[in-house]
Image (tube, grey):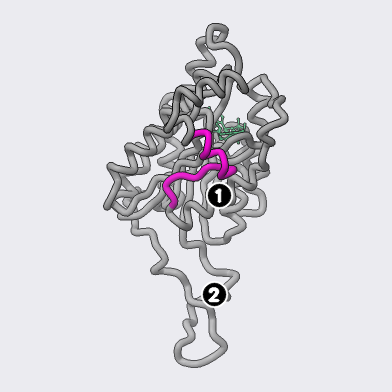
Amino acid sequence: MSHAPSPAGPSNRARPVTKSGPAADPGARPADQRAPRRTALVTGASSGIGAAVARRLAADGDWRLVLNGRDLTRLEQVAAGTSALTVAADLSWPGADRRVTETALDHLGRVDLLVAGAGVGWAGDFTGMPRARIDELVGTDLLATLHLVRGLLPHMVAAGSGRIVLLGSVAGSVGVRGEAVYSAVKAAVAAFADALRYELRGTGVGVTHVVPGVVDTAFFDRRGAPYRRTWPRPVPPERVADAVLTAVRRGTDEVYVPGWLRLPARVRGAAPGLYRRLAARFG
Ligand SMILES: NC(=O)c1ccc[n+]([C@@H]2O[C@H](COP(=O)([O-])OP(=O)(O)OC[C@H]3O[C@@H](n4cnc5c(N)ncnc54)[C@H](OP(=O)(O)O)[C@@H]3O)[C@@H](O)[C@H]2O)c1
């Protein structure tokens, strides 16, 4: 099967059926049964934010989806009732990203949207962090993301349209105590998003950097350290998913969820010494 991309866009949207008259298109379906026009690959779709994004895209009705995660059972639960194709793969394994992108291109014909939602965390002093966990964080949160983008981007650029959505974290904007490697990989994702956006100017392909604060998902239990602070309060993953869909619709470069989290990032940028003193005092 060819992986050649075809242009994405609204031009082939089926018109709603009108009751009668010469303008009626016999091939058109009723408005609520339009064939989905757009295509997306969502990683991290078996849990949390990625699952919420997958559900929102499926509910939108205009997307054909390929969903990736490691746990096939949970992945299929997310895909249940939709036409989404599931691809279970551990993205930290060499070559897994290629299998996922090739499956997506084979199945969908083109990928208009990549939501790179797969990620893991780790909390604790850096001196106690096992080497394997360092490799896992860098491999999953950073390297796999870069390779997925590298695999899909040439097709998007050739098509003259597309959007890459990268899941960052406020930890990457300000640096969080006890999350040194996680902060580092998310800062790398942020820098990658900025640099790539400059490079892609004029190609029709956009990059959205999504920067959540604390989100109520299995992320914290899985990293082995539950979220214990009373503030900031966790937001539901659906709120991040809504922000992703809005950003995709509007072509937004960067979105913080919740929006006020942009403030600490700005304070750190404008007055790093002050920010460090405040962070050291209030954690
Ligand atoms: N939760 C937060 O507070 C928060 C805040 C800021 C940013 N984020 C970021 O948001 C993203 C999603 O996190 P989440 O909160 O939704 O966490 P989550 O509920 O734990 O979901 C993580 C997802 O990533 C997948 N994943 C992990 N390692 C993988 C690997 N090696 N190969 C393929 N898939 C892998 C998981 O697949 P399986 O479940 O199948 O293993 C799961 O679908 C991450 O990038 C995270 O860093 C989260």
Q: Quick check: is 161 in the magenta stretch?
A: no
Residue depicted at 57% across the width and 61% down the height: 61
Circle 1 sits on which residue? 243
Q: Amino acid at mark 2?
A: Arg
Q: Earlier in the sequence, mark 2 or mark 1?
A: 2
Q: Count neighbours of disc 2 (C-alpha within 10 A) and say few if under 14, some if 14 to 19, many if 20 or more.
A: some
Residue 2: tell me if it is visible: no
**What residue span does the magenta drawing correspond to?**
252-265
Q: Quick check: is 262 in the magenta stretch?
A: yes
Q: Is mark 1 within 8 Å of ligand 1?
A: no
Which numbered circle lies on residue 138? none
Residue depicted at 44% across the width and 29% down the height: 271
Circle 2 sits on which residue? 29
Q: Which one is in front, 57 or 219?
A: 219
Q: Count neighbours of disc 1 (C-alpha within 10 A) and say few if under 14, some if 14 to 19, many if 20 or more.
A: many
Left or right of 191, for residue 256: right
